[in-house]
Image: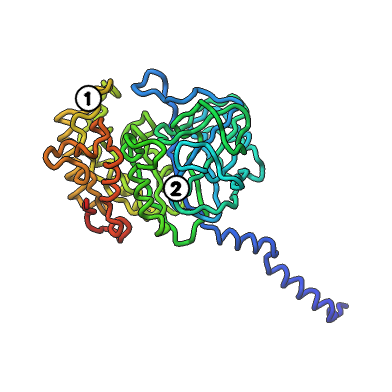
């Protein structure tokens, strides 16, 4: 014979059921904390593989580092209340051991390794100060409390305790990095004669930004990467665009690689292969500016790839259409930039054969398509912004870095000024962005 449950037992059972239906306080708090975070890419340097000796350009980095610290200075675009750092072993053939890593505010915007007193923070990875990164993988640091203003300069210091091949780097850093023996990740100042201008193993800095923040990615080659600009001065056109957008909570990340091509590898993998990694997978990206293709046109029959056949314009256009389709599938706006002038490019250097009349005709065909096809969401006429009106196949002399392929600082400023912000960030199928 069963007896009815007593009142105290009924009350206890109901209490147990109510507890089971409510997540534990710690879990609920953790979920709330995660929901409040808004990780946004504020700075990037696209990883490249270190190429073999004998290529037309040297890597200009050590083959290996061992028991050494590398300190790299980075200017962010938007700020935030916390930060995370992404290190990359993208092209490493063996595991990469990071013995220690720190982030701090940089004391100077120029060529100095000094950090701001009291701003140094230890980076951890899963709660540990040391991390081993598998071949082909990145490592994302734990969040670190560090209030960062828009356009803040930060120093990231990495200690490599073991002999480490530098298989993954970013060639055109345009910023001095400091290399010294021992673990100096917390040092207020690194005094050393060993410096490079490349980015070593550092690929992204994320900030916990306000929820309304957005990201514009500049996807290009050396003209986006800043070749020809003044080192340690942040004068690339994406840097200058970032200055215009910082107060609007819009980040600008630079996904340029010097020597990059849309269809072929060498100084980095081709654009079609790296588009997801360097652009579409970046947190909160919603617009990409595509300015790439001049190397696809100029490299064949040059010192870079002397045996390559000429590239037809329709192959480059077909590749652009692939990038457009992939961006739209991810609900990302894609803005096309016209290819800038290049008559006489590299003619006074050891690199020969980059320009020809036939290649110029290919550039003109591609630019006509970019301007008139309507397939991009908008167009920035970089060509019109920097060309010489009296000799439109060349840069305006005041904008030329001197090699007739890359702008100088004034040319990059003209490119950044040529972008109408309303059209850049507006609704799909907006009108062409005119040079001012």
Q: How far apart are marks 2 and 1 (CA)?
A: 38 Å
Question: Residue 332's spot in the image, x, y percent?
Answer: 36, 53
Please say if the residues under marks 2 and 1 sit with CB atoms less than 8 Å apart. no
Disc 2 or disc 1, which is closer to the eye?
A: 1
Question: Residue 230's spot in the image, x, y percent?
Answer: 35, 36
Q: Is residue 381 above or below residue 247?
A: above
Residue at image position (24%, 45%) is 382
Question: Residue 171's spot in the image, x, y percent?
Answer: 41, 31
Residue that mark 1 sits on: 347
Q: How crowded is mark 1: few (under 14 residues within 10 Å), some or many (20 or more)?
A: some
Where is the N terminus found, in terms of image quarters?
bottom right
Whether residue 137 appears in this view of the structure is: no
Residue that mark 2 sits on: 281
Residue at image position (86%, 79%) is 3
Is disc 1 placed on a helix, strand or loop?
Answer: loop
Q: How many marks?
A: 2
- If you read the primary sequence from the N terminus, does the residue marked by circle 2 or circle 1 appear first? 2
């Amino acid at each position: 014979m069963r007896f009815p449950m007593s009142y105290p037992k009924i009350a206890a059972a109901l209490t147990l059921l109510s507890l089971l239906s409510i997540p534990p306080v710690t879990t609920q708090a953790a979920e709330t904390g995660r929901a409040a975070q808004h990780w946004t890419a504020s700075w990037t340097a696209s990883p490249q593989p270190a190429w073999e000796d004998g290529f037309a350009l040297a890597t200009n980095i050590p083959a290996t580092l061992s028991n050494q610290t590398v300190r790299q200075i980075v200017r962010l675009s938007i700020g935030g209340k916390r930060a995370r750092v992404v290190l990359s072993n993208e092209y490493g053939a063996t595991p990469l051991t990071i013995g220690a890593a720190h982030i701090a505010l940089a004391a100077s915007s120029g060529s100095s390794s000094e950090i701001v007193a009291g701003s140094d923070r230890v980076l951890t990875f899963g709660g540990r100060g040391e991390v081993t990164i598998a071949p082909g993988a990145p490592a994302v640091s734990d969040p670190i409390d560090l209030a960062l203003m828009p356009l803040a300069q930060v120093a990231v210091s990495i200690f490599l305790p073991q002999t480490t091949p530098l298989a993954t780097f970013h060639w055109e850093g345009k910023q001095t990095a400091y290399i010294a023996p021992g673990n100096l990740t917390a040092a207020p100042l690194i005094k050393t004669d060993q410096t490079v201008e490349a980015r070593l193993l550092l690929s992204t800095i994320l900030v916990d930004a306000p929820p309304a923040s957005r990201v514009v990615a500049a996807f290009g080659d050396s003209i986006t990467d800043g070749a020809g600009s003044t080192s340690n001065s942040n004068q690339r056109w994406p840097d200058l665009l970032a200055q215009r957008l910082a107060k609007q909570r819009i980040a600008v990340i630079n996904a340029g690689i010097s020597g990059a091509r849309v269809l072929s590898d060498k100084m980095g993998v081709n654009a079609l292969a790296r588009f997801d990694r360097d652009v579409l997978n970046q947190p909160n990206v919603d617009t990409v500016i595509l300015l790439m293709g001049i190397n696809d046109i100029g490299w064949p029959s040059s010192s870079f790839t002397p045996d390559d056949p000429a590239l037809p314009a329709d192959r480059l256009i077909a590749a652009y259409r692939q990038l457009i389709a992939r961006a739209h599938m991810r609900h990302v706006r894609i803005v096309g930039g016209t290819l800038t002038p290049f008559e006489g490019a590299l003619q006074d250097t050891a690199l020969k054969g980059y320009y020809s009349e036939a290649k110029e005709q290919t550039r003109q065909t591609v630019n006509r398509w970019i301007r008139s096809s309507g397939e991009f969401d908008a167009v920035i006429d970089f060509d019109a912004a920097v060309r010489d009106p009296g000799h439109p196949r060349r840069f305006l002399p005041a904008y030329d870095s001197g090699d007739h392929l890359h702008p100088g600082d004034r040319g990059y400023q003209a490119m950044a000024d040529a972008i109408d912000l309303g059209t850049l960030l507006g609704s799909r199928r907006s009108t062409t962005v005119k040079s001012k």
